[in-house]
Amino acid sequence: MELSSAFEERVRQMEDARNHCMTRLQAEKEILAAKTRLLAAKAAAARRLERRRLLLERRAADLASRALAARAGIDAANARRLAVARDISSTNGEIEEAQRKAEEWDRFYESKRKEMEEFRAMSQQFEAGARQEVQRLKASVSQLQAALQELQSGGLRSDDAGIGAAEARKADLMAKKAKLDETLAQARQFRALLRQQLQKAFASSQVRDQKGAQN
């Protein structure tokens, strides 16, 4: 009986030890499961954080790319603005140069016009006076010729000195008439030359203006 009791006690102790071990193993298993779940949760959180980091990095790269594109657009706009400003400045310079040339041409044309008018008035005045002088000389020549004819046809006595003086007077008058005719012809040529120079100056100014407009 004592042996049986001892054996049962021993069996009971072993059963208790086994139960204690099973309880301990179950507790450790639950702790391990909890740690595993915790690690899994941490790993999931880490993966979420990594995805968020990658997303933020992509957003940062996209923003940087947009910023570079915007900067390039701003630089291009500034370049275009500077180009337009240069074009406007160049155009203003060309306009001012054209206005200056136009003003110079207006002054030149006005001065030439005044010179032409003055010369025309002087030429007309000179031509009128010359014509009057020519008419007067013609009348004198006619009178001398009539006097000579009268002397020659009337049979009146005249000495060689008187006839020679009349002939000399006639020759002098004819020479003066020829000189006046030459002076009138020179005046006409000078007037035509001045008109031709004025036309050439006008044509040259137009050619310069056309070349300036093409450049």
Image (spheres, rainbow, N blue to C red):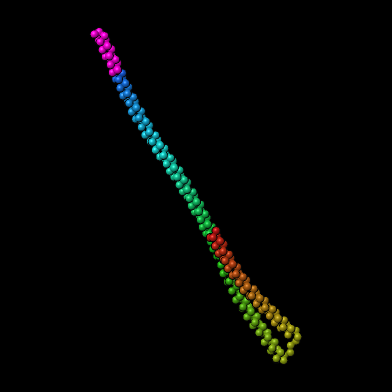
* Left or right of residue 215, residue 20 in this image: left
Q: Nearer the viewer, residue 122 or 83?
A: 83
> Magenta segment, principal secondary structure?
helix
* Left or right of residue 116, residue 45 in this image: left
**Residue 14's x, y, as percent?**
29, 15
Task: Give the residue displayed 64% in from the left and 79% down from the top.
Answer: 134
Q: Visible in this render: residue 100? A: no
Among the 4 quarters of the image, the one containing residue 139: bottom right
So how many labels did they put on this image?
0
Residue 183 falls within the magenta-colored stretch = no
**Residue 39's x, y, as percent?**
36, 28
* Left or right of residue 27, residue 65 in this image: right
Task: Give the residue displayed 53% in from the left and 57% down from the top.
Answer: 94
Q: Point out the stretch of residues depicted in magenta.
A: 1-20
Q: In this view, does 42 lie above or below 118?
A: above
Residue 12 falls within the magenta-colored stretch = yes
Q: Is residue 33 above or below residue 116?
A: above
Q: Visible in this render: residue 172? A: yes
Task: Give the residue displayed 69% in from the left and 89% down from the top.
Answer: 150
Q: Which of 30 and 103 is in front in this view?
A: 30
State which quarter of the image contains the C terminus: bottom right
Task: Give the residue displayed 60% in from the left and 76% down from the top.
Answer: 128
In this view, the residue farthest toward the right is 160
**Residue 202's x, y, as percent?**
57, 66
**Residue 135's x, y, as percent?**
62, 80
State which quarter of the image contains the N terminus: top left
Q: Is residue 214 above or below residue 29?
A: below
In this view, the residue farthest toward the top is 2
Q: In this view, does 190 lie above or below 17?
A: below
Among the 4 quarters of the image, the one containing residue 117: bottom right
